[in-house]
Image (tube, coloured by chain):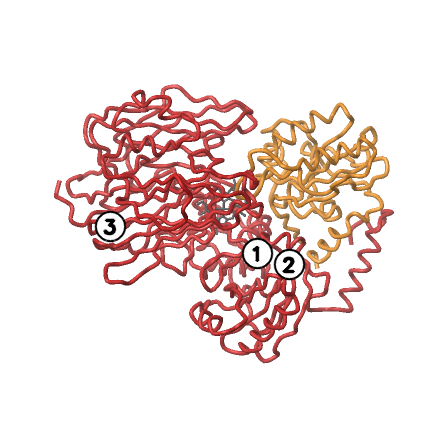
Chain colours: A orange, B red
Amino acid sequence: MTLLLLSILTACSSLFLDVPDFKRPNTAGEIISLHKMGDDATALVLISHGVDCPVIQQYSPIIKEMAASFAPKGVRFAFVNANTQDDAQEVAADLKEYDAGIPVFLDENQKMSMALAYKTTSETIVIDPKTWTIKYRGAIDDQIRYAGRLGKPRHHYLKDALGDVLAGVPVKTPSSRAYGCAISYLD
Amino acid sequence: MPKILNGRTLLGVLLAVVAAALVFSPSGPTPTSKVDDFRLLDHNGRSHWLGEHIDEDRIIFVAINHQCGTQDALQAMAKLQSDFPQAPAFYIAANPTQEREAFKTIIGGSNNKAPVLMDTSLTISRSLGLESAASATSVRPRDGLLTPLLKGLDDCQNPQPNGSELDYERDILPIIDDHCLACHTENRWVKIFKNYRAVRGWSQMIRQTLRTQRMPPGGYDPHVGAVEGGYTVKEMDMLLQWIEAGLPRSGDNDPLPQMNVDRIAVQNNPEDWGEPSVVWSMTTPDIIPAEGPDVYQYTQIAGPTPRDIYVSKIRMTANFKVAHHINLMVLDRPFSELTEEQVFKKGQDQFMRVRKINSKKGEMYHDHEHDPTIKVAHEIFEETILMTANRNKGLEMDFLVGPNRAIIIPKGSYLLLESHYGSSGKEESSTSKVLVFEHTEPKAAQIVERGCLYRGGFKIPPNKRRFTMKTAVDIEDDILLVRIAPHMHARGRSAKYIAHFPDGTTRVLLSIPYYQYKYQRGWEPKPHIFLPKGTRLETHVTYDNSKYNPINPDPTQWVYNGSSRAEEMHLPRFHFIRLNQEPK
C-alpha cells in the first residue's frame, strides 16, 4: 500500500498546488519549520539525506559548494532525513564531517519524506517559496552512480533548475532520475 | 492518515483516488503498477538489465514454464513479437533450479527465440505481475510502468516464494555472515548490518542491490562453478525473499551486533597471523588536497631485498578515504632506473613498460590494430603486481596465498607502491604500509606463480554497445590454476575464462556476466583447476562503450588501450602452481 501510494504520489508530484509547512527537530533538538525557512529565501533546496549512503557521501562536497555559491542569491539548502536506523548523533556526526552548515529536518515518523514522495536519498527538490510549488525533482547532477562516478557531470540538473527559478522562467528539465539509497518506509 | 490532509494540496484528492482504486481492484497489476529495476541471467548465462533499455518504448515479458504450458508461452511470444515488432522481448521462468539445459532445448527448437530470464527467487516475475505460464506484460523502462497483456494459464501457476517461512536468526544471519559482513562491519563500508534495526532501515536498499545483482559485488555466475567464499544462487534468493516477506523473525534475540564484534576482531588480528616478519612503510605521507584531479604516486618502499622472501600472507594499509587502490609491484631494478618517459609517458601503458623490464620470459603479444579475432600469446606473463589493495574490495586488503603455499619475492628485488588517489572534499594524508608474513617452512611450500594474459593495442569505437575480444595462451607445463582475477576499466562488461583441454573437451572455468569496475575481485576456483600441458586457456571479454553503460566517462569518443581510468585495459591475472616443480 505504501509503495503504491508512493508511486502514485511520485507520478503526480508536479500536481502539488502547494507544499504544506513541516516542523521537525534538527540535530540540536530545536524545532525548525519549512515555511519559516522560506520566508527570506528566493528558492529552497531540500535534499533527502541518509547516514553512510555512499552516494550522498560523495555528493557532500558538491552540495557544500553549491550551497555556498547560491547563498548570496538567497537560495537556502536543507536536508531531510527519514532513515529509521539513523539517530540524531549519527546524523550530526555525518554532517559535521563536511561542515557545510546545512540544517536537517529529522523526519522520524517519515511523514514529511513520504508526503514529499522521496524514494531515495540524494533525491533533491527545488521549491519556490513564493508559491510553495515544486519546481524540480531529481538528481543533483549525473556524476555519481551506484558502482562508479563520471569524471565530471554531463548534466547539472540542480544548478540549471535553480538558474531558471531565479530567472523566473519555467524549469527546462523539471525532473531526472536520482541515484541514492532507497528509503525504507516502515509502518 | 497524515496530518497533511488538512493542507491545501491535491494530496487529499489523490489519497481518495488511491483508496478508491484499492477498493475496486483489490489485486492484480493495474495500469498504474510499476516494476522496480532488476537484472537477471538468461539460460545462456548472459546478464540482462532492465535499466539498460531506458530508450525503448516497451519491453515484453512472457512467463514460461518448462513443465507445463510451454507451447502456450511460445505462442504468446509469437503473437506479441508480431504485435510489437520493435520491442525487445524476453521469456521469464520462475524456477529455483533454473533448468538452463531444458530451456536451451525448448528455445533452440522454436521459431520464437528470446532469452529466457532465470527468475530463481520467484520474486521478479511476481513484481511484473506474472503469476502463471503464458501470462505476459509490457514494461515501459523509463519509469517501470506495467501494462498487462495476457492472462496466462490457470492450471500452470508459478511456484510461490516462501519468504514468510524464513527466520532472521536461523536462515538469514548465516548468509549475511558468510557473504556480506566481511565488507560491511562497522570499520569497513556502509554500516548496513549493525543490528536488526539497521537491516530493516536499509531493507529497501538491500532489496535493490539484490534485484540488480550489484551485491555481493563481483557478478560471477555460480552456475558455472564454485569459488572459494562464493555465494550460491539459493542464498541470495533467500535473502531477497525474506525482505519481500517483510523481514520475519521469531523472537527479539539479535546476534548480529556480536557477529560484528567477532568479525572485527578477526580483521584486526586475522586468526593466527602473528607478527609480520617484514614491514615496509612510506617514510613521508602522501598529502591529498581537498579538491583536484586524481593522481598516481609512485614510492619505492624497499630494495634491494637481501634474500628470497617466501610470502605466505600480506596486509596492506592506506588511507582508503582517498586511496582508490594501491599496487605493490616487484621490480628487478630500482625505480630510479626507469626513466620518467618509460613510466609516465602519456598514452602509453604503465603496466606493460614496467613488466617488460621485469619480465625475462618470452614475447609479449601486442598488436596495434583493432582485431577482435583470437590471437595467441605464447606465455602467461610474469606479473609485476604482487598485490592490489582497493577500498572497494573488502578483505582483499589482506592477501592470503593459501595453506602451505608461498609466493617468492626474489633476492635483489625493489618494491614499488603505486598509489591512486582521489580527493574526498577534505585534505587527507596517507601513509601506506605493507606487512609481510613469511612462510615458516619455505622448503616445503608450494610455489605460487603469478601471470597475466595481457592484450594491448586495441581501441573501441564510439557508442559501441558490445565490443568483444579474446586472448589465449597455450599452457606448456602441467599447472594447477588457483586464482583468476579479471581486470578491465569502466567499459568492462563481462569476462569468461575457458579451457580447451588436449583431449578435445572444453570447460568454462569462470564466468563474470556482470563485471563491475568498482568492485574488482579475484576468485579462487573450488576445487582448483588442473590444466595439463597442451591446454589452451582463453579469455573472452566484452566492453560497453555506449551511453547505456552508466559509468562510461564519454561514449562519444574512441577509447584506446592504456592504464589510466579513462582508457581501457585487458589484464586478467592468474595464480598457478607448476605441478612438476623442481625441488628448491
Label ID, residue B35: 2
Disc 3 crowd rating (10 Å Cα; few below 14, some 14-19, many 20+) is some
Residue at mark 2: chain: B
Q: Which residue is drawn at 59% across and 69% down?
A: B62
**Is B281 positioned to the left or the right of A54 in the image?**
left
The relative height of residue A172 versus residue B16 in the rendered view (above or below) is above
Residue under label 3, please give it: B475
Report helix, strand or loop for mark 2.
loop
From the image, state whether disc 2 or disc 3 is nearer to you.
3
Between marks 1 and 3, how big is the CA–CA gap?
A: 40 Å
Choose the circle earlier in sequence order: 2 or 3.
2
Disc 3 residue type (three-letter): Ile
Q: Looking at the image, do the residues carrying marks 1 and 3 touch, with CB atoms under 8 Å apart?
A: no
Residue B524 lies left or right of residue B43; in this view the side is: left
Dot 2 and dot 1 within a common chain:
yes
Vertical arrangement, residue B474 with respect to residue B187, above or below: below
- Depth check: give the residue in front, B43 or B129: B43
Q: How far apart are marks 2 and 3 (CA)?
A: 48 Å
Are callouts 2 and 3 both on one chain? Answer: yes
Q: Which residue occupies 29% across, 56% down?
A: B527
In what quadrant of the picture does the C terminus of chain B appear?
Answer: top left
Which amino acid, by three-letter code, is at mark 1?
Phe
Q: The N terminus of chain B appears in which quarter of the rendering?
A: bottom right
The kind of secondary structure element at disc 1 is loop
- Marked residue chain, label 1: B
**Rendering coords of residue B158 (x, y %):** 56, 72
